Every structure is written in structure tokens, then in C-alpha cells.
Amino acid sequence: MDCDLDTSIPDWIIEHPETTGVFSGLGLDINCAGKSLEYACLQNDLSPTVVLEQLRDAIDGSA
């Protein structure tokens, strides 16, 4: 799966468990009722593109 802003946080964690720390560090609810990453970011006054970059950095760092 190619995770992006439309992917839910639980799907991100299933596909890339190494992103869990990013979500926790940002205070994002890892359950989020299946809402998209973009929706969760906007609800928490976070920039979706900045969060996406942090997640991709976490994935790249674990390789």
C-alpha cells in the first residue's frame, strides 16, 4: 500500500509500524475512527504536508 494523506492513521501504522512514534509525538489519535491523515491533521491544527514529510522520514530512517 502506498500511504498518503487520504490513508487513515490505523492503515499507516499497519503498513508502516515505525510511524507510530510520529503519531504519538504529535498527539494524533491513532484510532481516529478511520478518518484520513489529512482530516486528522487539520482537526489538530497541524500541516498535513509537514506531518506527511515526518512520516516519510520515519519510514526512510528505518530502512
Image (cartoon, rainbow, N blue to C red):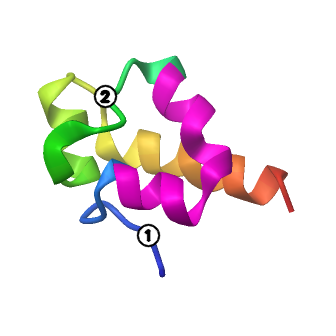
Q: Position of residue 59 (x, y in %)?
A: 69, 56
Q: Amino acid at mark 1?
A: Cys
Residue 3, image quadrant: bottom left
Mark 1: few/some/many CA within 10 Å (<14, 14-19, 20+): some
Earlier in the chain: of badge 2 and badge 1, it is 1
In the rendered view, tell whether residue 15 sits above or below residue 24. Answer: below
Q: Residue at x 56, y 48 (%)?
A: 55
Tag 1 residue = 3
Q: Amino acid at mark 2?
A: Asp
Q: Residue at x 28, y 50 (%)?
A: 37
Q: Quadrant of the C terminus?
A: bottom right
Q: CA distance from mark 2 to mark 1?
A: 17 Å
Q: Is residue 35 visible?
A: no
Q: Is residue 8 visible?
A: yes
Q: Is residue 21 magenta?
A: yes
Give the magenta-colored segment's residue range.
10-24
Task: Using residue 38 as the reference point, say whether residue 50 is left or right of it.
Answer: right
Q: Secondary structure at mark 1?
A: loop
Tag 2 residue = 29
Q: Residue at x 61, y 30 (%)?
A: 21
- Single out the mark in the foreground, 2 or 1: 2
Give whichever of 16, 54 is nearer the camera: 16
How many numbered marks appear? 2
